[in-house]
Every structure is written in structure tokens, then in C-alpha cells.
């Protein structure tokens, strides 16, 4: 039998769809699942694509079915299972075989696994895959980390299965060891911020303006034709217009307001903190999900405090809707700017040399945050790859100038109405902090010096680094 050019372990939803995508693009693939019944079922359901698929019942059979040097995609739950799978495979593999972890893995685990294979002749790729089930089946965005040589060996097959933006494949090699998984983590952090900001706008339309789910869906549908055009706005429209088959109510009104999370948003926030980068949108989004999950406490608190009446709208009719649209754009700019700043810092720290224009480019299609907006980010970074912050590029600074007044009005309205808008508010605070040359940390420095003799720099550069605090201060 003709050997496969690639193998895949793990026939869950993502693994199955990825395998079908690989087979459909004319690549011969061997597949293996822990439970052989699933492998049989998968091959039986593959239809005409089964021609390109070799279903294997044992791991030995699976390895033998792939032509060396073997690229093997592992698409199983991130964590210990990946280490166990690697241990099971290792004795069966030969020099130059490549293990490719395609799960949502913490990049620190990826670096550890990459290093652990260094002297074995085997290589490791940490590969971020975004786009959910549909993306895996018909074209995901793929973020690759590993050696450049191992990338070259899988480039063709990964390019064939990736999403395309105007014909341009949404896959790239981003750097060594954990680079791909790190970029996927930040993708998810931005995804959290994007989703949180959209849901805050939904909250203002629902609880402030009293609009129905369907009406809000209409608004998002309109916005999707403009600058906010994106997959997340598009699915928000669809979701808001769907009815519950049981009650006939809007489906979204029947869903408990407690968000789940699997950890990638939290990792993004943690890494931003580790790197000393302010990623307030991502942090607000993670905290928003945490508070959302404390449903019983929130119900009890509402009974104590009640809710304020919605404030007077800053504009009549369409004016406020335009403000909301602009506010979402302004806040989105801040969140993306923060995400890219985290990646820039991580790139330096880990010696990756992450290519910012390429990252924006491969996020334009296939992934969950795909949008027209990312094409504009691609252009901005292509012109200035080393810019300190996306916000100060000519195109984005103009966008912020055009929209920050709207964000200000929307955040004020939400605050006066008692509607929580942590991500939108954090975006405004981030912008106001970032663009003010003289901030207020001089007082913090004075306080630190008072109680801890930590010293400060003077604005006139003079060599006198402690204050005249007198008795009570720790330096006297
Ligand atoms: C993607 C998604 C995908 C997954 C998230 C969901 O890019 O395709 O981000 O990876 O849906 O992990 O994460 P939460 O369960 O944490 O929301």
C-alpha cells in the first residue's frame, strides 16, 4: 500500500476535520485514535475522501503507514496527554521525524517538549490552529513554531489546508520552539477582548436602550457592512436573530449569562504581566468572564443594590448608534495594539524575532478574529514593523482621533447607567494614559520614597533622589 505523507493522532472534532481537510487537498494521511472504533467510524464516514486516508488500529501500524521522515500531527487535549502520546511514539520513530502538537498548548510546555527532543534526532513543532470546527475542515489560520528546516518540510501540506485571504495562505513559520503556540495564545487573548467588547455593546443596547435581541442583531448586521466587518460581528448577528426552538424566545435570552473559559485568555493576561506590558483589554475580558460565572453572588448583590435607571442618551436616535459603532472600533484598536505589544515584548525575551506584519497577515482569514481590520493592521506593520505601538501609526492614530470622542460618550453613558463596560472603559483609560506625556506616577514615586526610601528621578535631572519628607518618613 502507498504510504501516507503525514499522520494525525486524535480523531475528536478538530482532529477529524483537520484530517478530512488534509485528505481533501490531495494529501495521503494515516490516522490513529486511542479508541479504534472511532477510527473505523471516521474512515467509514469520510466518503470519497477515504481513498486518501489510512485508518490504523495500532500505533505501530500507524507509524509504519507514514513515509519517513514522518510528520505526525497530535491533536489531543493539551496537557499531560501530549507528553504521554510522545512517550508512546518515541521508540517507534526515526531520525528527522517531526512531532507536531496542534492543540491549544501553553507555549512553555512547547518549549520544554522542543528542548526534550533536541538530542534525539526528532524534531518538534508547536502549531497554533484557529478557526474552530469549520476552520479545521475548510481552512484554518495556522501559526507554526519550530526549526525553520522542519517548517520547510511541512510547508506544502500546511499551505494546502490553510485558509486563504485573497489567495494568500494564512499560514506561516513564526519562529523557533514556542513561537507558534505563543502567538495562538495571544490570538485567543485578543479573541477574549473582542468578544467581551461586543458583549458590552450588546449590554448597552439591551439594558440601556431597551432593544430586543433581534433589533440588536439588525444593528450588528449593519455594522458588519462597515469598518467593524468581522467574523465575530457576523456570528453575533446570526446568534442574536436565532429563536429558541422550545420557547420561541430569542435563543440568546434563554442562555445563562455565565461564560466558560479554557485558559488561553488567562495565559495571555499572565504573560502580558510577566512581560511588563499593559494588556488591559485582555485582563478586563478574563475578569469579566470570572465575574460572569459568579452568577449566584450577582443575583444576591442585585437584590441588595438594585439597578440604576438608564441615563439620558448623549444623542437621539441614530447618533448614539454611530457612537457605539465608533466606540467599538476605538476599543478594538486598543485591544489589538496591546496584543501586538505583548508579542513584541515576548519576541525579544524569547529571541523569536516574531514577524508582526506576517502575524496580522495570517489572521486575516480562517481564524476566529478574522476581519478586514486585520488587513489594515497588516498594512500598518508592513510600513513600520518595529513601531512601538499600533496606535501611533498614521492610519490607526487617525482612526483613534476619529473615534475616541464616541468611546468617551459611550463609557460615560454606561457608567451613569450602571451598565458594566470593563473592556470599553479599560480601552479608554489605556488611551488616556498612553497619550498623556505628564501622568501622575510622580506622586506614586514620592509615596514609595516616603515609606520605603526607594528614590526617584527628578524632572531636571539633578542628582538629588530623595524627598524632604521629614520625621515619619522611613529615610529619616
Ligand atoms: C480558535 C478558538 C479555539 C477555542 C478557544 C475557546 O482560535 O479557534 O480560540 O481555540 O474555541 O480555545 O476558548 P475558551 O473556551 O477559553 O473560550
Image (cartoon, rainbow, N blue to C red):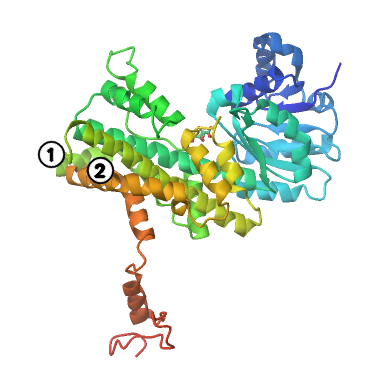
Q: Is the residue 413 above or below the residue 52 in the image?
A: below
* Residue ID at (40%, 30%): 233
The disc placed on residue 410 is 2
Q: Position of residue 438 (x, y in %)?
A: 34, 69
Residue visible at 41% across and 81% down?
455
Graded by Cα atoms within 10 Å as few (under 14), some (14 to 19) or many (20 or more), the crowding at tag 1 reads few
Label drawn at residue 309 = 1
Out of 128 and 14, give the one closest to the viewer. 128
Query: What percent of the width, then of the height, locates residue 97?
Result: 81, 37
Crowd around label 2: few <14 · some 14–19 · many ≥20 (10 Å): many
Give the image location of residue 322, x and y in percent. 27, 35
* Mark nearer the N terminus (1 vs 2): 1
Give the percent coordinates (x, y) of residue 145: 67, 44
Q: Gap in Å between the C-alphas at discs 1 and 2?
A: 16 Å
Residue at the spot 73% in from the left edge and 28% down from the top edge: 157
Judged by depth in the image, the label closer to the viewer, 1 or 2, is 2
Q: Is residue 54 above or below residue 63?
A: above
Report the side of 290 relative to 210 (left or right). right
Secondary structure beneath dot 1 equals loop
Q: Quadrant of residue 93?
A: top right
Q: Is residue 281 visible?
A: no
Does the rendering let one see residue 25?
yes
Give the camera-side residue of 370 and 405: 405
Q: Which quadrant, please, contains the C terminus?
A: bottom left
Amino acid at each position: 500500500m502507498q504510504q501516507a505523507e503525514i499522520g494525525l493522532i486524535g480523531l475528536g472534532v478538530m482532529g477529524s476535520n483537520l484530517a478530512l481537510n488534509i485528505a481533501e487537498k490531495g494529501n495521503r494521511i494515516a490516522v490513529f485514535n486511542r479508541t479504534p472504533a472511532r477510527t473505523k467510524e471516521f474512515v467509514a464516514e469520510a466518503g470519497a475522501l477515504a481513498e486518501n486516508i489510512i485508518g490504523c488500529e495500532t500505533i505501530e501500524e500507524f507509524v509504519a503507514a507514514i513515509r519517513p521522515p514522518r510528520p505526525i500531527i497530535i491533536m489531543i487535549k493539551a496537557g499531560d496527554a501530549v507528553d504521554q502520546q510522545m512517550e508512546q511514539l518515541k521508540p517507534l520513530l526515526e531520525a528527522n521525524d517531526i512531532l507536531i502538537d496542534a492543540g491549544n498548548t501553553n507555549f512553555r510546555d512547547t518549549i520544554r517538549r522542543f528542548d526534550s527532543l533536541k538530542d534525539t534526532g526528532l524534531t518538534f513543532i508547536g502549531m497554533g490552529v484557529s478557526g474552530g470546527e469549520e476552520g479545521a475542515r475548510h481552512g484554518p489560520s495556522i501559526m507554526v513554531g519550530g526549526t525553520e528546516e522542519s517548517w520547510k518540510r511541512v510547508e506544502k501540506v500546511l499551505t494546502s489546508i490553510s485558509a486563504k485571504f485573497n489567495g494568500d495562505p494564512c499560514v506561516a513559520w513564526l519562529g523557533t520552539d514556542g513561537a507558534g503556540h505563543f502567538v495562538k495564545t495571544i490570538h485567543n487573548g485578543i479573541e477574549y477582548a473582542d468578544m467581551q467588547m461586543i458583549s458590552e455593546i450588546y449590554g448597552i443596547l439591551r439594558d440601556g436602550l431597551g432593544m430586543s435581541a433581534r433589533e440588536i442583531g439588525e444593528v450588528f448586521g449593519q455594522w458588519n457592512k462597515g469598518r467593524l466587518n468581522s467574523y465575530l460581528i457576523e456570528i453575533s448577528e446570526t446568534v442574536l436573530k436565532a429563536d429558541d426552538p422550545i420557547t420561541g424566545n430569542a435563543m440568546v435570552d434563554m442562555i445563562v449569562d455565565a461564560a466558560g473559559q479554557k485558559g488561553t485568555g488567562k495565559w495571555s493576561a499572565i504573560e502580558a504581566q510577566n512581560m511588563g506590558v499593559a494588556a488591559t483589554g485582555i485582563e478586563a475580558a478574563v475578569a469579566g468572564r470570572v465575574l460572569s460565572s459568579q452568577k449566584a453572588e450577582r443575583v444576591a448583590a442585585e437584590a441588595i443594590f438594585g439597578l440604576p435607571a438608564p441615563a439620558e442618551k448623549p444623542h437621539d436616535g441614530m447618533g448614539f448608534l454611530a457612537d457605539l459603532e465608533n466606540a467599538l472600533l476605538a476599543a478594538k484598536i486598543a485591544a489589538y495594539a496591546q496584543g501586538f505589544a505583548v508579542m513584541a515584548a515576548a519576541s525579544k525575551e524569547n529571541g523569536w524575532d516574531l514577524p508582526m506584519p506576517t502575524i496580522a497577515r495570517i489572521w486575516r482569514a480562517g481564524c476566529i478574529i478574522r476581519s478586514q481590520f486585520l488587513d489594515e493592521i497588516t498594512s500598518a506593520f508592513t510600513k513600520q514593523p518595529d513601531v512601538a505601538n499600533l496606535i501611533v501609526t498614521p492610519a490607526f492614530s487617525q482612526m483613534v482621533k476619529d473615534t475616541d470622542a464616541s468611546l468617551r460618550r459611550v463609557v460615560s453613558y454606561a457608567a451613569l447607567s450602571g451598565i458594566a463596560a470593563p473592556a470599553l472603559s479599560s480601552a479608554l483609560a489605556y488611551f488616556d494614559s498612553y497619550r498623556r506625556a505628564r501622568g501622575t506616577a510622580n506622586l506614586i514615586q514620592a509615596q514609595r520614597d516616603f515609606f520605603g526610601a526607594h528614590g526617584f528621578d527628578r524632572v531636571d535631572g539633578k542628582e538629588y533622589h530623595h524627598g524632604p519628607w521629614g520625621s515619619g518618613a522611613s529615610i529619616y
